[in-house]
Amino acid sequence: MTVATPSPVAQARRAERRRRLQDPTLVLRLAVLAVFALVPMTISSFQVTDLLLKVALFGTLVASYDVVIGYTGIVSFGHAMFFGFGAYAVALSLGKLGAPTYGHLLAGFAAGIMLSALVALALGAFSLRVKALFFAMISLAFAEFALILAVQLSSVTGGEDGLSPALPGVFAVGFDGGRVLGVALGGRLITYYVLLGVCVALFGLMSRFVRSPLGRTLQAIRDNELRAEALGYRTFAFQLASSSFASVVAAVVGGAYAMWVRYVNPESTLGIPIMLDVLLMVIIGGIGTLWGGLIGAAFLLAARTLLPDLRALSAALFPNVEILQRLSERWLLYFGILFILVVFFFPRGVLGTIRARLSRRVS
Amino acid sequence: MKRAAPLLVTVLIALAPLGLMDPRTYLTLTVAGLAMGMLIFLVASGLTLIFGLMDVLNFAHGALFSWGAYAGWSAAVLLDRRWGWAASPSVTANLGVLVAAIATAVVATLLLGVLLERVIVRPVYGQHLFQILITLGATIVLEELIRILWGPNDQVMPVPLSIQGSWDVWDVVVLRVPVVAIVLGLVVYAGMRLVLDRTRIGLIVRAGVENGEMVQVMGHDIHRYFTGVFATGAALAGVGGLMWAIFSQSVRPAMGGEQLIFAFIVVIIGGLGSVTGSLVGALLVGLSYNYVAFLVPKAAIGVTMALMVIVLLVRPTGLFGTPR
């Protein structure tokens, strides 16, 4: 009789599970979650709540982008498009099918997911078959096309003006759930917690995805495509799966964003500016870290809320120097410079650099 | 025969709409389409050259396009305000404005191209991900600099009087600006083919496209050629930007970004790295856009996308591309 020794794969899996429980950053992650969960209860400022949830939503969006750019090594400029698909699908389903119900909400999410998956498959089928580099150009063309379409089909999408859907039941602004533990439970707060839950679930899903055998294979393809191909992996199929998965996640985040902001227009959901934001966030946070997206999102969104003050300050100090006014107005310039500097000097971003430092100290 | 097939298809597509409209409209649309194609070709040829030789996907190309337009605009406005050259009926003065504007655009974008290659692109050779990211960062900075230096609003481009309006050839309205654009595009294409096929520099550049390491082993400083090709590509984008500004009679800070997408589609259709491919691709896009815009206005935006998708399905490496 032979003793059933676990296979190497099972052993690796067991070791991984053990390591994950001892991971010191687990505490850190729980602390971050606690901040997201507790702050809206204690501070009843809408600005703070709004900023927090936007950080969570964009952090999740950036993480899904990181799955494509960091874990698969494909540069996509169409990721904001999938975010927009989700946002528009939810907004349309809530706004155009009569009084909003939970069913409409779910149907909106489902439509966004389906559309994103289909478009992502088509996009990948056209571009990845040739060369991963094509993906950057073709996805940009697709995104531009989607943007033009959203503006042109104004009878459906509301054109440049966009849509402002109302939410059903407990998510409605007017909903009053009384007081729970001394906190007024309004529609806003319920929406906040539901969406936070969605973000947490998506994060868990993505973290699972990149650690799965599929995710490992993707990283192998990223590091050396030829070798992975020689080992018998159909790289095209793996890249297609990864980009489609990330697109679906982006669509769900887009739907959640539409639920929170209650306003969808081409500029704020589909456009190139959103794509630039996501790129900046992923670079600052760190490519290939997944969690860096939260750092990037927090930095950029906080900076954006503070920058108007800077403009006011410069206007007060030097009211007559026009070039200075323009310099302080164009905050995107500084983000651009920051972007180049980070790519040059910290190509791993904040989290990636910290991780590299720590692992060097340990070994 | 196999090489001629894409050309044949292009000619067929160019002739097809003849059955759907009267010949005069057809001719006007064809001139407009050829002009648009030539303008896109100016941008796409630089892009494809840089990619072919250096394996760099230059996302800053659109910003260089805008910079060329704004530099040329500044020269034209200066000459027009000081001496009224653009508005004067004298052909010499008009030509002077045109030449000065083109020269300014070329010089400005050449310098910018050298700067970009040396500072931004050189450290990231061979790393596609970082190339895309860093040239994208450069795009943001360059576009914002335009907004700071020239203001964020649209400006009117002074068009020299003698190329305004149209000629009347056998009852066919032929706009003058498109003709200038077509001539300029043909000159640039001929010049590029001449330099690439007939000169020593062209030989080395073509050899560099084939095998850069080997060229370096033969004792040529390939990096100098890289800088030269990058700057030339930048200047082509700049001229394209200026011509587009004259064509549309205005300059906008974001104009480059929109054209870059057209240029990308053209480069994909023509095949990455092929100059002739980008000419054929650009003409295809320009012509089909104009025909469809006339026949079915709503579908015009989709036609370039459809063209790209069809080409990718039939020939994944583009019309003139070689699998690499």
Image (spheres, coloured by chain):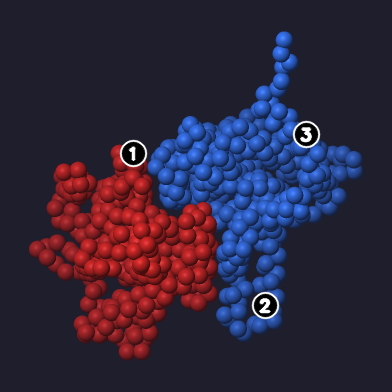
**Chain containing the residue with disc 1:** B
Name the residue beneath numbered marker 3: A18
- Amino acid type of the residue tagged 2 in the rendering: Ser
Measuring 31% from the left and 47% from the top, which residue is drawn there?
A: B322
Between disc 2 and disc 3, whose residue precedes? 3
**Chain containing the residue with disc 2:** A
Please tell me whether residue B180 is drawn above or below residue B19 in the rendered image: below
Q: Is residue A171 visible?
A: no
Q: Are marks 2 and 3 in contact (CB under 8 Å)?
A: no
- Amino acid type of the residue tagged 3 in the rendering: Arg
Share a chain, discs 2 and 3? yes
Q: Which chain is red?
A: B
Which mark identifies residue B313?
1
- Amino acid type of the residue tagged 1 in the rendering: Leu
**Chain containing the residue with disc 3:** A
Where residue A51 sits, quadrant-wise, is bottom right
Measuring 49% from the left and 42% from the top, which residue is drawn there?
A: A225
